Image (cartoon, coloured by chain):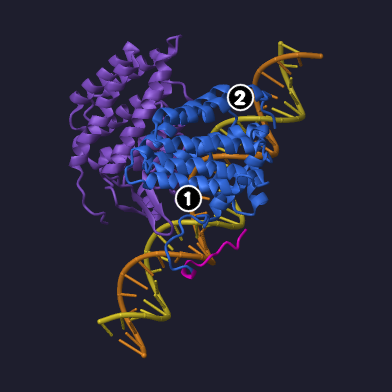
Chain colours: A purple, B blue, C orange, D yellow
Amino acid sequence: MAETHLSPESMSLPLRMSPVASVSRRDGVINEIRRAVVLGTIKPGEKLTEVQLSEWLNVSRPTVREALNQMAQEGLLVQEPYRGLRVATLDAAAIMDLANTRMALDMLAATAIVEDDSGRRMRMVEESWAEYSQVEMDPDPVIRHESHVAFHRKLWAASENALLLRLWPVTEAHLTIILAQDQAARADPARAHRVHEKLVDAIRTKDLEIIRKAFSEHTVRSAEELIPLLNTESPKE
Amino acid sequence: MAETHLSPESMSLPLRMSPVASVSRRDGVINEIRRAVVLGTIKPGEKLTEVQLSEWLNVSRPTVREALNQMAQEGLLVQEPYRGLRVATLDAAAIMDLANTRMALDMLAATAIVEDDSGRRMRMVEESWAEYSQVEMDPDPVIRHESHVAFHRKLWAASENALLLRLWPVTEAHLTIILAQDQAARADPARAHRVHEKLVDAIRTKDLEIIRKAFSEHTVRSAEELIPLLNTESPKE
DNA sequence: CCCGATAGTCTTGTCTGACAATCTGCATCA
DNA sequence: TGATGCAGATTGTCAGACAAGACTATCGGG
């Protein structure tokens, strides 16, 4: 996988319409590493070195370093001083922590959405759902993961709560780790579609109790299903 | 500020938890800038340049850069590509966002604390309260701010929710900005003491409704009081 | 006189190369 | 055999440099 150079000059045509703000090289590096984690190319617990990655991705060490710092701050990587970085591993407790925290924040977002009389926030939800529906069946698991993640981020964005949006990257990192640990988790896009459709339907009712049940179904239940699947092997290198 | 070496061999008991993990120079820079923001030395909206800060703090530009990146990620600074960094400013909506989000997450933490039968989490709350009480009347406003912030962080830590702890830095950054924008907000330590005492008392009852009321009193009310005090001057340099 | 284009400058983004601090593993010696 | 110390590896930090994009001010045209 050494030939994934993100040389911008190779493509002279400015016709890429991806809204990815990957203008900077650092963002490119981040995307590349994140993709490797999602794909399982880099396994949880595996050690990463700055020089290795800089050769790998054909960028300088400072650039790699900035990317790694950011990802460590988000929690996708864990950093031990003078000892390197590893892809984070999460245990059963962490999975439940994520589920509980998302319940709280998803409900916060939902409350803000249903309390908006202008209908703008609800419209944003519909937009997110439409975009998600378009690509959810993509054969590329990375694309599916990204669209899934983007859907939930847009749900938070629809609440128009500025802090919530800032909390998202950290939440997403945890989510990514968990899904990366269990490959089977993203094996059933049809089921994912049904669950998310119920979620949107619930939000449309504007009944917070119904919404809570739908989120519980979506988040807590899937977490409880995920925990027994944990392969609890010790971190190796 | 360089002589903070305390040899770990001197104390053989592994009792100490976090003396200051500021082993690195980057953390020193972060603390320095954060302190300047809290003190009002750097005002919201003011522009920061990397070279200026590196001369200022006597460190290299890459080090300053790493610090600035981290703080931008936390939200204390806002970063516009090729245009520099400024101390973030928050409007009334953002203050209410912070209050609502903290309500949700504080209640999540409180729920985890009261549901813990071992009593360990409640003991952590008591510890946090004891530490906070010791320094809350310190004449240095920065010390007071830090102890206040540390108290709330430890409340989240007491929930033993790993994700919550990772969400704290972003939350703290918003809190810091808001308090920095309104100097008067930290002018009354006695009142702060009463409010926080009621908070701890409420948690001791283990009654979630009482706890909710206390947090509401603490968080939402103070936010509503803060909003009219906003000096809505345009960002200058 | 006012307005728009262009050049210069400033700041960030990135690179190269280097050195110090620290951890790890292996070899040596009591 | 066990402890010690040295060498390699990796991170943390530094210095200097250049390119890319954005801001500013001057100059020319309407």
Residue occupying the point 44% across, 13% down = A116
Q: Main secondary structure of the magenta part?
A: loop
Label 2 and label 1: CA atoms lie apart by 45 Å
Residue B127 on image: x %, y %: 47, 48
Q: Residue furthest front?
A: B205
Write down the chain letter for disc 1: A
Q: Is residue A222 visible?
A: yes
Q: Is A142 situated above or below C25?
A: above
Do the residues marked 2 and 1 share a common chain?
no
Residue in front for this viewpoint, A217 or B150: B150
Residue A210 on image: x %, y %: 29, 17
Q: Is B215 situated above or below A57?
A: above
At label 1, counting other C-alpha atoms closer than 10 Å, the crowd grade (few under 14, some 14-19, many 20 or more) is: some
Please tell me in which quadrant of the rendered image residue B34 appears.
top right
Q: Which range is magenta?
A: B1-10
Residue occupying the point 28% across, 48% down = A44
**Residue B8 among magenta residues:** yes
Q: Which labelled disc corresponds to residue A222?
A: none
Q: Secondary structure at mark 1?
A: helix
Amino acid, disc 1: Pro
Q: Secondary structure at mark 2?
A: helix
Residue C22 on image: x %, y %: 46, 65
At label 2, counting other C-alpha atoms closer than 10 Å, the crowd grade (few under 14, some 14-19, many 20 or more) is: few
Labels 2 and 1 touching (C-beta < 8 A): no
Which residue in the structure is indicated by mark 1?
A: A62
Q: Which labelled disc corresponds to residue B225?
A: 2
Residue B177 on image: x %, y %: 59, 34
Residue in front for this viewpoint, D26 or C21: C21
Nearer the viewer's eye, disc 2 or disc 1?
A: 2
